[in-house]
Image (cartoon, rainbow, N blue to C red):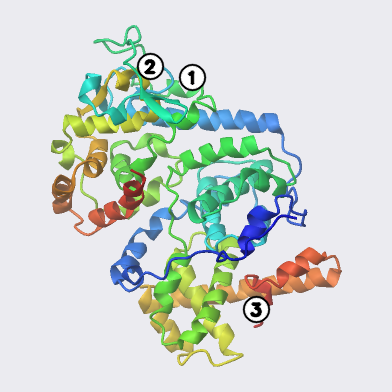
Amino acid sequence: MELLCCEVDPVRRAVPDANLLYDDRVLQNLLTIEERYLPQCSYFKCVQKDIQPYMRRMVATWMLEVCEEQKCEEEVFPLAMNYLDRFLAGVPTPKTHLQLLGAVCMFLASKLKETIPLTAEKLCIYTDNSIKPQELLEWELVVLGKLKWNLAAVTPHDFIEHILRKLPQPSEKLSLIRKHAQTFIALCATDFKFAMYPPSMIATGSVGAAICGLQQDEDVSSLTGDALVDLLAKITNTDVDCLKACQEQIEVVLLNSLQQFRQDQGDGSKSEDELDQASTPTDVRDIDL
Amino acid sequence: MERLVARRTFPLFARTSACRSLFGPVDHEELSRELQIRLAELSAEDQRRWDYNFQQDVPLRGPGRLQWTEVDSDSVPAFYRETVQVGRCRLLLAPRPRPEGAGDSPPPAPPADEPLDGLGEAPAPPSGGPVVAPAPAPAAAPQESDEQEAVPPPRSQEPLAEPLHSGMSGRPAPGTAAATGSAAAAATNAAAAAGGAVATTAAAGGAAIKKLPGPLISDFFAKRKRPAPEAKASNEVPAGCAAPGAAPAVGSAEQTPRKRLR
């Protein structure tokens, strides 16, 4: 057993930068450039022959599990999914290479966003050693090339703070809303329906869904219903109807995910690990609607 | 701490249910073949983009979008000359003798009319790949879109091409900055383009001089390589032509990481 030095802070984080958060130009610029990082097409129809939508869900679920187990930053998973979708929108890929691709995307996203990134070796272990670290590194180059090294994609997380600070919520409620919204964002990233949505809409819809969901348990918001949607839509310049539709879709996906979870539990096939995971705060499944 | 525990302190982490192979065994040979194909695609794309054969390290024979001209290695900053790492020191290499045929007349390279030849040719070996491919990277988005306008056909499978383009439709037409692309700026591009691999030509000094009112790679690099006032000036030219808001905003967004790296 190695010694732990417990005097170190868990993760050193910069304080929120008012220059970034309280300047509307930042939000406007994010809104301007976000579309550039969307996948070019709905690739199941036009590019991929071997890969089916359920396979994307499988690899996405696996990636989310790995990210949670490794306690990655919240943005790593959605960012990795962005890379994956953009790559698949351009490069026909056999399904046997899909997990490798997922690992490469996590590898890149983790390097971009984390102080202690995931290692190639660890990711390979997570594929049950079906790929070798060398292959991961080689394909990293291919993914980078195909993405034109454009890695700093805008993700829904980039919008969360900008949205939250404009809401009239009491600040003690914000952290719970934030946490739930982050969970919704991860949930959206696993579902291909949302892959072509602009990140700002996913962020806005997730915050809306988080507030609505929490509203049922406790009073987190002075705003409800249409007033809330109107305000949210105004913040990110989203069409109200689109936003409503998006929020409803998020709620549907959440319900499906909950049902899936109960089914899994019903099977009694859950290992202890999985139950453990379900109790982590980032997991969607502990949100009670 | 939580994360340190997760990442570092327990290197032999217990296998969890997340350790699984999703789609069965991987055919490593097939994977490797696919890798070579993809790397060759990227390499051909780079060759087309820079009119430069990175494998043989010689400019393509024209007429292409870019015309490569030799410059003396002494005229470029040491930063762009070939170095070799010895222990903790980095030593400048003496200019290498130019390869045969790479003199005044264009070197033996596939004619630019059929740049696709490069595709079939020796795909970048994994070790050589990294040197070549990263090069265009810093060029990042803004310039990307410019290029789209000038080089319509070859990029169809590039995932970002359209969004980039459409997102930037308001950008100034390429051509404005040709004036700003001085030889020095162009040299920067050339060197940056070839990255470490610039070797012979750039070590002997390679500089691209704009010939056509093309995509203006120099525009982009020129902006960042120059001292602030000049950079501003070169920024203003295009900005004045169209899309006052978009271009500078994007430029600055993309600039930050580079500034830090340098």
Residue B111 position, x and y percent, is 34, 17
Nearer to us of marks 3 and 2 is 3
> Who comes first in sequence, dot 2 or dot 1?
2
Residue A242 percent coordinates (x, y): 45, 73
What residue did someone put label 2 on? B110
Residue, x 33% and y 25% (percent of image)? B51
Q: CA distance from mark 3 to mark 1?
A: 55 Å
Task: Report how far apart the C-alphas of labels 3 and 2 lie in the structure.
Answer: 61 Å
Kindly report the distance in space between the C-alpha atoms of the residues bearing marks 2 and 1.
10 Å
Which residue type carries mark 1?
A: Glu
Where is residue B144? Give x, y as percent. 33, 43
Residue hosting label 1: B121
Up the image or down, B213 lies above or below A188; here it is above
Tell me what residue is drawn at x 44 percent, y 20 percent. B55
Q: Quadrant of residue A31?
A: bottom left
Q: Is residue A35 visible?
A: yes
Q: Which residue of the protein is positioned furthest toward the top in this rendering?
A: B100
Q: Are marks 2 and 1 in contact (CB under 8 Å)?
A: yes
- Amino acid type at circle 2 is Pro
Residue that carries the numbered disc 3 in the rendered image = A287
Q: Badge 1, how many Cα within 10 Å: few under 14, some, many 20+?
A: few
Corner quadrant of residue B48: top left
**Residue A92 vertical placement versus A74 (above, below):** above
The one nearer the camera, B251 or A246, is: B251
* Type of the residue with mark 3: Ile
